[in-house]
């Protein structure tokens, strides 16, 4: 046990007593003996300190002093609970938001991919803005052209997705497969987690089917069973051996369940795939050749693409506006998220600054009120350092608690922000709260603490301003007041900008959620029933007909139909469509044929969805057997035949690979926009399932709760074909809700931000007002004494606050407009909010501020005249 | 206090206080004041230890494990802290005494090189 200062004191006391006693025994006078003993002893505190120093280091003393100061700080903060709460909440929100967003930014923008030498890994994309297709992918002839001539790329990897029905592992299920060439994994620089990946030997036409599981699929479907390697799975009519499991990596551009070699997919071996220049479904990756740079590869490939387009003009119509882009894979993955994340990070940074300034505001106001306390301490000999240390201890307590809250918030927020950012970059999903959150939080807290400790002015010995009579200690200089007001106005302005933005997002979310659809959402159950595999067209029709017939007999079922696209969920399925023309339509000079997307449907498809036939008739079972027929959407009919005589005209597809035979239009149906949540005009051509036996989606219109049908429907289908996958049953209403989830999250994240900013700003304004009111107690006393009513004082203070709010809103509107304009020039997708969100933002801000102002205003009205006047 | 008395007093050589304390305590436990008095009387009043040096030295020796201490009531009927040598302290005392003897011998050799009776100042 280390002796403490009490022990040291007692030892010295004992020494003194013995010394005095000895002197008295030697015959000295007691008083003189005591004086002499004290003189001999020397300066007692110095002796005690010299003993203390033996046992305790200076560092220990410094921390003890800080601890002591912190305890005092904590006690004095407990007396100012409202202030402490506000400051901690404000800092916590600021720190939490920053730490969470930083985690996601780090994951998406800063962390390298797992791919080996990822800075030499290139992603090549063909797009066609004219078809509003961002990613058109490549056809095999195109890839051959590029591969044959490129010198800046050492090796190419290609990747195309196709759906298989997988059997051999429990329930039949349809899975998404990536089909790759032998150099794909080498180009991507990926390693196996188990077994092996695919290489050149797997490319041979006589190679056996080989499949690599993605890490996600292995984890979810096989529970990481290592014994799965070496087993055989049936994919449609063929089978393939599982040769390995891929390490966890960023799936781009699409996440698949398995990755297979080419022989597993008959489609990839067929003539359509191999010879048709328009048959695009393959993604292209490349490894830079030694010495080549991304820039040189880009220049070479774009030039080659231009030459290719000139050589095959028929495959590259000018209105489609074909383009090629060449980027590092990492940049390609991060690019869509970069602007948004940096914007979010900047927003969070400003929120933090505003939070700090707000806290500084409160601390400043408090410190002015404490000036007399500090002045007394300074007069009693406390050094400037000691005073700062007291302030630092107090702000450490505050910002420490704020950081604790912030880290807690960040922990919860990282997943939300990650899911939010995932719509821009899949990598955001991997963001996890980890130690870096703690570091960022602690760092921000430390910055805040030190900054806050230096906000208050210390009383200087030369100007003992605060040493007035007790209670009159509050002195407010015009400079302090103006600084406070500027802080408050900035906060209002900023939170107004955020509120308007959030209002816009909420408005567009509401618009999407309430957007009318032309069909019945609640009563339609959709089920993925993949096209039967390994059978010819007639058998496919038989299968779907039998399924339809038997499900229709279930109680509660009103109509059953087969289609190809579940609205919204299957957006993009069946590609960008084909060009077509209709006999009798006279195009204007230079007008190229329009593109339409085709859909295969069974009879009564429109009835099952509740969509009206506007002219002509629906398909019947007889359609598709002899004469070729189609139904077109209202937009096609109106655009090309405004007089309403589209029925019975003949439509022809005009692409090189499409069947040139004419199809008679038997009906016109209302537009069904199955790709956009807010429907727009769509060019669609429907053909009978019998004409092209490819379906995959079942639509069941039911009375009552459609979900009760899931089990009987599954059972019926399995009875007909035991290896048939039956998946993803949901009502259209739920499909829509699922598709809207990211939008909701978007609105949620930004509203959260705006709410934080609003809270901070309102606290700031109320703080400034409260401070101003308490600083002017005397003035209000005088006003009351000369005849002002409390009501007038209340209104006076409210007016003062309202003017801050109005100036802030105007400044925010101007700044927001400027920022919006600037951002729009960078990313053209942004829109300025409409009048309604702006006005509601102003209303919300105004109301919140008014409520916050009432407290200080009421305090002004309650000033006691006598007390106020006595305070001078 | 007589001025001549002070002039005759010797300043302690650096590093010898610890040894003196250990030596004094060889006679048995003693409190700080007693140790100071013992050094003074044993040196015929030539050595006087300042309390400001004595106490930190005692605590230093205690912290290093050469002394141990105990609170007891002194002859003056006052609670005082009594210090006592530990086994390690005794060994340390022996080491320091040997070192001191060597030092005295060595310095004596150097100082006595001069011709007998010659005054250093006159050289």
Image (tube, rainbow, N blue to C red):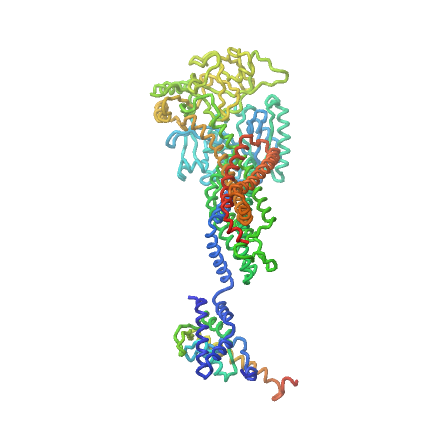
Quarter holding the N terminus of chain A is bottom left
Farthest-out residue, right: B123
- Nearer the observer, A262 or A5: A5
- Nearer the observer, A255 or A807: A807
Report the residue at 62% width, 29% height from top: A305
- Nearer the observer, A268 or A365: A365
- Residue A309 position, x and y percent, is 62, 25
Count of numbered labels shown in the rendering: 0
Report the residue at 46% width, 33% height from top: A258
- Residue A112 position, x and y percent, is 54, 42
- Residue A703 position, x and y percent, is 37, 21
- Residue A685 position, x and y percent, is 50, 18
Q: Would you place residue A830 above or below residue A396 in this image? A: above
Quarter holding the C terminus of chain A is bottom right
- Does residue A777 show up? yes
Q: Would you place residue A23 above or below residue A480 in this image? A: below
Q: Is residue A858 left or right of residue A715?
A: right
- Does residue A421 show up? no
């Amino acid at each position: 046990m280390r002796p403490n200062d009490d022990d040291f004191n007692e030892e010295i006391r004992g020494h003194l007593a013995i010394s005095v006693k000895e002197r008295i025994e030697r015959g000295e006078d007691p008083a003189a003996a005591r004086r002499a003993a004290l003189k001999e002893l020397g300066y007692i505190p110095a002796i005690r300190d010299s003993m203390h120093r033996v046992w305790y280091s200076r560092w220990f003393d410094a921390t003890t002093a800080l601890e002591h100061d912190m305890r005092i700080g904590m006690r004095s903060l407990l007396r100012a609970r409202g202030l402490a709460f506000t400051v901690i909440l404000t800092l916590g929100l600021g720190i939490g938001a920053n730490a969470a967003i930083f985690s996601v930014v780090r994951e998406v923008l800063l962390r390298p991919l797992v791919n080996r030498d990822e800075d030499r890994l290139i992603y090549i994309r063909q797009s066609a803005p004219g078809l509003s297709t961002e990613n058109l992918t490549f056809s095999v002839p195109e890839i051959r052209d590029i591969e044959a001539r490129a010198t800046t790329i050492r090796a190419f990897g290609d990747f195309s997705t196709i759906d298989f029905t997988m059997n051999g592992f429990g329930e039949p299920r349809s899975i998404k497969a990536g089909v790759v060439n032998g150099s794909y994994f080498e180009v991507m620089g990926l390693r196996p987690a188990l077994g092996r990946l695919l290489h050149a030997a797997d490319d041979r036409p006589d190679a056996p089917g080989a499949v690599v599981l993605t890490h996600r699929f292995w984890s979810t479907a096989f529970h990481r069973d290592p014994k799965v390697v070496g087993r055989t799975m049936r994919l449609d009519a063929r089978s393939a051996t599982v040769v390995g499991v891929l390490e966890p990596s960023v799936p781009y551009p699409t996440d698949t369940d398995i990755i297979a070699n080419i022989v597993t997919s008959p489609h990839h071996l067929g003539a359509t795939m191999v010879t048709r220049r328009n048959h695009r479904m393959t993604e292209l990756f490349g490894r830079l050749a030694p010495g080549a740079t991304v820039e040189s590869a880009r220049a070479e490939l774009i030039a080659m693409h231009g030459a290719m387009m000139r050589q095959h003009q028929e495959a590259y119509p000018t209105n489609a506006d074909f383009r090629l882009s060449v980027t590092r894979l990492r940049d390609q993955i991060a690019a869509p998220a970069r602007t948004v994340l940096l914007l979010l990070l900047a927003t969070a940074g400003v929120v933090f600054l505003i939070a700090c300034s707000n806290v500084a505001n409160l601390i400043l106001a408090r410190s002015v009120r404490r000036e007399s306390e500090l002045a007394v301490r300074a007069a009693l000999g406390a050094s400037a350092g000691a005073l700062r240390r007291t302030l630092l201890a107090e702000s450490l307590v505050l910002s420490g608690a704020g950081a604790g809250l912030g880290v807690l918030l960040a922990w919860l927020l990282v997943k939300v922000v990650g899911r939010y950012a995932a719509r821009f970059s899949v990598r955001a999903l991997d963001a996890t709260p980890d130690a870096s959150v703690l570091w960022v939080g602690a760092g921000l807290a430390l910055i805040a603490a030190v900054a806050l400790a230096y906000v208050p002015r210390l009383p200087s010995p030369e100007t003992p301003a605060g040493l007035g009579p007790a209670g009159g200690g509050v002195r407010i200089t015009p400079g302090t007041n103006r600084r406070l007001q500027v802080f408050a106005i900035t906060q209002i302005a900023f939170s107004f900008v955020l509120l308007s933005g959030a209002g816009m997002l909420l408005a567009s979310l509401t618009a999407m959620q309430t957007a009318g659809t032309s069909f019945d959402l609640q009563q339609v159950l959709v089920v993925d029933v993949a096209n039967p595999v390994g059978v010819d067209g007639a058998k496919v029709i038989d299968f779907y007909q039998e399924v339809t017939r038997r499900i229709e007999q279930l109680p509660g079922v009103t109509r059953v139909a087969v289609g190809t696209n579940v609205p919204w969920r299957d957006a993009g399925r069946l590609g960008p469509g084909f060009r077509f023309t209709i006999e009798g339509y006279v195009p204007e000079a230079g007008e190229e044929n329009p593109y339409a997307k085709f859909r295969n449907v069974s009879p009564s498809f429109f009835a099952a969805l509740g969509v009206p036939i506007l002219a002509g008739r629906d398909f019947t079972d007889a359609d598709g057997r002899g004469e070729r027929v189609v139904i077109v959407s209202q937009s096609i009919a109106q655009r090309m035949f405004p007089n309403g005589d589209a029925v019975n005209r003949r439509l022809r597809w005009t692409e090189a690979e499409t069947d040139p035979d004419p199809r008679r239009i038997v009906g016109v149906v209302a537009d069904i926009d199955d790709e956009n949540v807010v429907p727009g005009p769509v060019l669609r051509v429907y053909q009978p399932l019998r004409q092209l036996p490819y379906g995959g989606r079942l639509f069941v219109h039911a009375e009552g709760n459609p979900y009760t049908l899931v089990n009987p429907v599954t059972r019926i289908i399995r009875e007909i074909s035991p290896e048939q996958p039956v998946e993803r049953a949901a009502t259209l209403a739920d499909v829509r809700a699922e598709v809207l989830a990211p939008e909701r999250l978007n609105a949620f994240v930004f509203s959260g931000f705006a709410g934080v900013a609003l809270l901070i700003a309102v606290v700031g304004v109320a703080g400034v007002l409260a401070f101003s009111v308490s600083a002017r107690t005397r003035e209000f006393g005088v006003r009351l004494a000369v005849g002002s009513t409390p009501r007038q004082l209340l209104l006076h203070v409210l007016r003062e606050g309202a003017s801050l709010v109005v100036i802030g809103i105007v400044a925010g509107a101007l700044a927001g407009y400027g920022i919006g304009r600037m951002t729009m020039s960078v990313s053209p997708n942004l829109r300025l909010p409409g009048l309604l969100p702006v006005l509601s933002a102003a209303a919300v801000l105004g109301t919140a501020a008014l409520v916050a102002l009432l407290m200080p205003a009421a305090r002004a009205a309650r000033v006691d005249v006598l007390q106020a006047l006595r305070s001078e | 206090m007589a001025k001549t008395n002070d002039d005759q007093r010797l300043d302690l050589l650096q590093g010898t206080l610890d040894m003196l304390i250990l030596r004094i305590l060889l006679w048995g436990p003693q409190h700080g004041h007693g140790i100071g008095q013992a050094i003074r009387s044993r040196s015929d009043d030539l050595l006087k230890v300042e309390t400001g040096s004595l106490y930190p030295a005692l605590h230093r020796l205690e912290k290093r494990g050469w002394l141990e201490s105990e609170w007891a009531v002194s002859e003056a009927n006052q609670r005082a802290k009594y210090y006592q040598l530990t086994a390690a302290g005794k060994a340390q005392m022996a080491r320091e005494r040997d070192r001191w003897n060597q030092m005295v011998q060595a310095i004596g050799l150097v100082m006595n090189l001069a011709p007998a009776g010659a005054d250093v100042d006159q050289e």
